[in-house]
Image: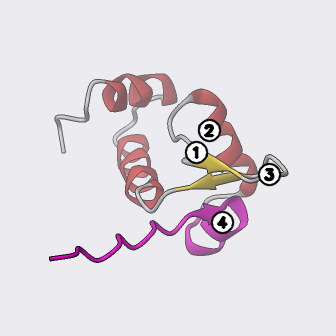
Amino acid sequence: MATKPRRPEKLYKIGEIVEFTDYSRQTVHNYTMLGLITEAKRTLSSHRLYGEDVFEKLEKIKQYKEEGKTLHEIKDILDKGDNNS
């Protein structure tokens, strides 16, 4: 029995992330440069594309910031697997 092809994951441009969140383009860029979020792919013209999981990760970052954590502390938490959520 043949299996159905897997549906491709939706990838989002920075502009779409900005549209669907409270984050600015610069903040998304900064979080990428700090390693808080990572791009899933790049287009042929080198534009960053992010997977659907970026929205969950941005929400976690927001929660940690509200708790008073610094971006470096948040990166450490996320790198260790975010066991607190």
Residue 22 appears at what percent x and percent y?
58, 65
Tell me if 74 is positioned left or right of 25 in this view. left
**Residue bounds of the magenta highlight:** 1-22
Does label 2 or label 3 sit earlier along the sequence?
2
Residue 78 appears at what percent x and percent y?
35, 32
Does label 1 or label 4 sit earlier along the sequence?
4
Check residue 4 for magenta coloring: yes
Amino acid type of the residue tagged 4 in the rendering? Val
**Which residue is located at x 73 percent, y 55 percent?**
25
Marks 3,4: beta carbons within 8 A? no
- Badge 1 local density, few (<14 within 10 Å), some, or many (20+)? some
Tell me if 65 is positioned left or right of 21 in this view. left
Instruction: Provide the secondary structure element on which disc 1 rests.
Output: loop
Q: CA distance from mark 4 to mark 2?
A: 14 Å
Residue under pointer 4: 18
Q: CA distance from mark 3 to mark 4?
A: 22 Å
Q: CA distance from mark 3 to mark 1?
A: 14 Å
Q: Quadrant of the C terminus?
A: top left
Check residue 72 for magenta coloring: no
Residue under pointer 1: 39
**Which residue is located at x 48 percent, y 23 percent?**
72
Query: On the image, which quarter does residue 56 sit in?
Result: bottom left
Residue under pointer 2: 32
Residue under pointer 3: 44
